[in-house]
Amino acid sequence: GAVVSQHPSRVICKSGTSVKIECRSLDFQATTMFWYRQFPKQSLMLMATSNEGSKATYEQGVEKDKFLINHASLTLSTLTVTSAHPEDSSFYICSGSEGAPYEQYFGPGTRLTVT
Amino acid sequence: SQELEQSPQSLIVQEGKNLTINCTSSKTLYGLYWYKQKYGEGLIFLMMLQKGGEEKSHEKITAKLDEKKQQSSLHITASQPSHAGIYLCGAGNLGNEKLTFGTGTRLTIIP
């Protein structure tokens, strides 16, 4: 149980375009979803926390207008990278939590390459 | 903010040998999570520790949290190629669900 999927797994886009990444909890209701970013050989950096039906809370230094997060239902959150640039190329991972004891279940990640 | 330091950063171990990975926090840990990540993939949950002195085991992996709740260790016995990957410790925060991750330990198992 507790499976999280992400789509797409890999995406290549041109600079200036927008990309949407979906994160779905398949067998549980994720009241909270998290979006992380991971650079090569580095740890995960939390970008934002989103609760279903409310605005996402962004971590310091993360541009909310560039990384649009929507958590419209208890099983779906989306991250849209707007006007993507090569420096946005990274591995993006989402996770979902159904509440206490706050265990997070992670998706397989999406590798974004901006050319 | 809480910082988690893992050591070593990378580890090369011969198959069959034991190994230990450490995770040290700058603050008291309210929940300590261990995850494993294969390169380019998501995280697999291994164990969660909450109480000082707590120890949990699953198959050949044992995780411990010290009494002061500022340090955790992950011990693998008789390592196998399937143990290779990146091990991440994550600290839970009191009152919310956010996790702060450690710097990671890259484990390589050689025949």
Image: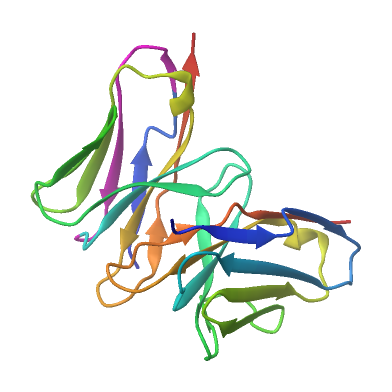
Residue B40 pos. (x, y %)? 63, 43
Please identify the quarter of the rendering in which residue A22 is found.
Answer: bottom right
Residue B33 pos. (x, y %)? 32, 52
Q: Residue at x 81, y 69 (%)?
A: A84
Q: Residue at x 28, y 72 (%)?
A: A100
Q: A19 above or below B78?
A: below
Please identify the quarter of the rendering in which residue A37 is found.
Answer: bottom right
Q: Which residues are magenta?
A: B12-28
Q: Is residue B82 left or right of residue A23?
A: left
Q: Is residue B53 left or right of residue A27?
A: left
A60 falls in the magenta region:
no
Q: Is residue B55 left or right of residue A17?
A: left
Q: B59 above or below A33?
A: above
> What number of labels is visible?
0
* Identity of the residue furthest to the bottom in this view: A54
Residue A20 pos. (x, y %)? 75, 71
Quick one: A39 or B85, which is closer to the camera?
Answer: B85
Quarter placement of the N terminus of chain A: bottom left
Q: What colour scheme governs how the chains and residues are painted in the rendered image of this protein? A: rainbow
Residue A53 pos. (x, y %)? 53, 90
Q: B60 above or below A12?
A: above
Please identify the quarter of the rendering in which residue B19 is found.
Answer: top left
Q: Residue at x 46, y 73 (%)?
A: A30
Quick one: A11 or A64, which is closer to the camera?
Answer: A11
* Identity of the residue furthest to the top in this view: B111
B20 falls in the magenta region:
yes
Quick one: A80 or B24, which is closer to the camera?
Answer: A80
Q: Is residue A7 left or right of residue A75?
A: right
Quarter placement of the C terminus of chain A: bottom right
